[in-house]
Image (tube, rainbow, N blue to C red):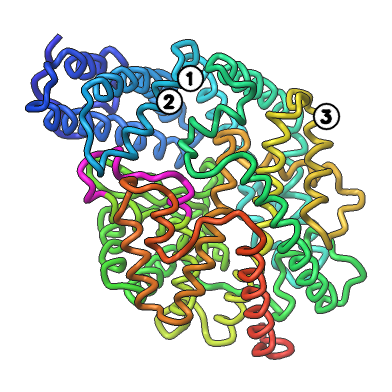
């Protein structure tokens, strides 16, 4: 069948089945290909991918906004389990045509390397496996998105308990902590059973492709050309050596400041310098308005891009019943726009989450200038460099009058973020080490063994907190980590990027204008360069070793000490 004209909008595919999409791929398979036609063929293929992925993204967004709507779930599952897996299969066939043609140019080098890898590891038998995994991911979101906890006479979505973890009243903090963990404890067996099935399917897919386990499969599948599993284990060791002791020192100060014999997990979010938690904004309108001003201060181009997102209603930021947990930025490739989703409840964490997702959004804006869809989105290690660097580059601009915080409040928020950087690095290392164990130990299909391994690995990295009597709650933490269920091995990227972002921040302390300019230059590269070159363009070095990480940790600790010293003994409520 010949299809002469592609649809003019992703809306044409909103209710499509595979039989509606397949003819467009068939036409690309059948179209004569030589040096005179290949550029037009590539543009047509890219446009088709833009249309389909944007239609799929819009369906996913609609579902995560309201996980209780069966029609939205059905639309999302139609794309994720039917259309996208079959589109990927067809794309492999088209990639074979391109590779066989011998067509190449420098700006396509990374794309061609990815295509060759996809061709090598693709197995038709895995198409239904990954479709089934998508169905299971939707089930995970349905279970967790519907979770609520009783609080003050009403059932609240779990994100709405976060402010109470910052209460100066320790009893309230403990009650909120236990209430937020209980739904995961209650659903432990169902989630463990779900993961058992996901584990078996992933290991089978890896064996189908000729790999010993899913960890070995995922490195080429995620196009990790510039580092290895051994590098990840070096990273774990470097975090254990440099960051874990820093966290222990930091928590010792917190324990002393709070006047406690032992820190419990509900003591980690409260501000030990304040009588009440910071409230950086009152409602979403204020939240967004102040963010717009912050981005203007960092760079006028970024400010204009964020205002475009406001004007085009590309933000969904508040927490509501039925909304999926977490936050993300999704790229709408056809129109060249990003969409930000999160669950804001009025905390400093919300400001940092929006900065993080906005970094992804600015990446989408900058890389859209690349002509083909495959040239725009680099690996997650570069994508997370964009987001984590934005958190740090924005920090000096968060102060009043137009930002979120008065002077002492700004210091307090900055201190919280610096401490979160160290805490997040040990968390990232533990999550990646745990996933490595799951898929390489031979015992990852045993639910009890998984839980025991999580406790052992967590204790390796997380020190200074008393979890006595809270084993079920500590185990529940990994069931809350949606990446482990839905995006396996998507987590080490956060750590790699955080190390890069700290280098960019260090550069900004000397020359903030140049640091932002280099940051934007790196974003504009999209995926036309390898990971080490993207990091160099941003002013950083791709690194996994303690020799690089150690001095950055020392810089963070030094800044923490400086900020602590500038805070009053006890700030007003």
Residue appearing at x 71%, y 63% in the figure: 243
Residue appearing at x 45%, y 82% in the figure: 510
- The location of residue 185, given as percent across then percent down, is 77, 38
Give the residue number, with chain letter if any, for mark 3.
Answer: 448
Q: Earlier in the sequence, mark 2 or mark 3?
A: 2
Q: Quadrant of the N terminus?
A: top left
Q: Are marks 2 and 1 in contact (CB under 8 Å)?
A: yes
Closer-to-camera residue (309/459): 459
Q: Secondary structure at mark 3?
A: helix
Is residue 381 toward the left or the right of residue 17 in the image?
Answer: right
Q: Quadrant of the C terminus?
A: bottom right
* Crowdedness near tag 1: few (<14), some (14–19) or many (≥20) residues, C-alpha within 10 Å: many
Q: Quadrant of residue 415?
A: bottom right
Q: Earlier in the sequence, mark 3 or mark 1?
A: 1
Q: Secondary structure at mark 2?
A: helix
Give the Cα separation between the discs numbered 2 and 1: 7 Å
- The location of residue 475, given as percent across then percent down, is 78, 41
Give the residue number, with chain letter if any, for mark 1.
Answer: 131
Rendered position, 329 above or below 387:
above
Is residue 311 toward the left or the right of residue 536 in the image?
Answer: left
Q: Earlier in the sequence, mark 2 or mark 1?
A: 2
Viewer can see residue 238: yes
- The location of residue 362, given as percent across then percent down, is 34, 58
> Magenta region: which residues?
368-384
Q: Quadrant of residue 479?
A: top right
Rendered position, 305 above or below 375:
below
Give the Cα separation between the discs numbered 2 and 3: 31 Å
Give the residue number, with chain letter if any, for mark 2.
Answer: 80
Q: Quadrant of residue 412?
A: bottom right
């Amino acid at each position: 069948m010949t299809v002469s004209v592609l649809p003019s909008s992703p809306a044409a595919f909103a209710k499509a089945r595979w039989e509606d999409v397949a003819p467009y791929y068939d036409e690309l398979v059948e179209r004569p290909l030589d040096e005179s036609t290949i550029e037009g063929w590539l543009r047509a293929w890219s446009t088709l991918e833009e249309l389909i992925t944007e239609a799929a993204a819009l369906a996913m967004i609609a579902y995560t906004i309201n996980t209780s709507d069966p029609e939205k779930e059905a639309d999302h599952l139609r794309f994720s389990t039917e259309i996208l897996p079959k589109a990927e299969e067809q794309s492999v066939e088209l990639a074979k045509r391109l590779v066989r043609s011998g067509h190449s140019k420098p700006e396509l080098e990374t794309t061609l390397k990815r295509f060759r890898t996809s061709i090598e590891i693709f197995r038709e038998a895995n198409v239904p496996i990954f479709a089934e995994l998508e169905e299971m991911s939707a089930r995970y979101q349905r279970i967790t998105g519907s979770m609520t906890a009783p609080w003050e006479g009403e059932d609240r979505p779990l994100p709405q308990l976060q402010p109470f973890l910052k209460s100066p009243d320790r009893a309230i903090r403990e009650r909120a902590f236990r209430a937020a963990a209980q739904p995961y404890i209650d659903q432990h067996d169902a989630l463990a059973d779900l993961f058992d099935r996901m584990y078996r399917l992933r290991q089978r897919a890896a064996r189908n492709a000729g790999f010993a386990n899913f960890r070995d499969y995922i490195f080429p599948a995620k196009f990790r050309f510039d580092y290895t599993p051994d590098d990840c284990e070096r990273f774990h060791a470097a975090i254990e050596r440099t960051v874990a002791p820093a966290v222990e020192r930091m928590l010792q100060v917190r324990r002393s400041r709070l006047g406690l014999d032992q820190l419990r997990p509900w003591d980690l979010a409260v501000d030990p310098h304040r009588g009440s938690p910071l409230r950086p904004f009152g409602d979403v309108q204020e939240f967004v308005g102040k963010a717009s001003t912050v981005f203007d201060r960092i760079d006028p181009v970024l400010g204009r891009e964020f205002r475009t997102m406001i004007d085009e209603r590309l933000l969904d930021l508040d927490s509501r019943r039925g909304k999926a947990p977490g936050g993300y930025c999704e790229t709408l490739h056809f129109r060249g726009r990003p969409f930000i989703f999160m669950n804001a409840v009025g905390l400093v964490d919300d400001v940092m989450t929006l900065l993080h997702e906005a970094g992804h959004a600015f990446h989408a804006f900058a890389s859209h200038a690349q002509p083909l869809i495959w040239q725009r989105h680099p690996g997650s290690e570069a994508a997370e460099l964009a987001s984590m660097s934005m958190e740090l580059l924005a920090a000096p601009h968060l102060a009043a009058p137009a930002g979120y915080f008065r002077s002492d409040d700004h210091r307090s928020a900055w201190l919280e973020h610096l401490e979160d950087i160290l805490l997040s690095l040990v968390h990232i290392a533990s999550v990646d080490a745990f996933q490595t164990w799951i898929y390489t130990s031979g015992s990852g299909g045993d639910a009890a063994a998984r839980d025991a391994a999580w406790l052992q690995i967590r204790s390796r990295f997380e020190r200074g907190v008393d979890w006595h009597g809270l084993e079920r709650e500590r185990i529940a933490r990994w069931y809350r980590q949606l990446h482990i269920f839905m995006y396996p091995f998507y987590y080490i990227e956060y750590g790699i990027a955080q190390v890069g972002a700290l280098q960019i921040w260090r550069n900004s302390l000397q020359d903030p204008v140049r640091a932002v300019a280099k940051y934007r230059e790196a974003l504009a590269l999209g995926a036309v360069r390898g990971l080490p070159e993207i990091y160099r363009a941003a002013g950083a070095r791709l690194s996994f070793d303690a020799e690089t990480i150690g001095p950055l940790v020392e810089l963070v600790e030094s800044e923490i000490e400086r900020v602590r010293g500038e805070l009053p003994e006890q700030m007003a409520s």
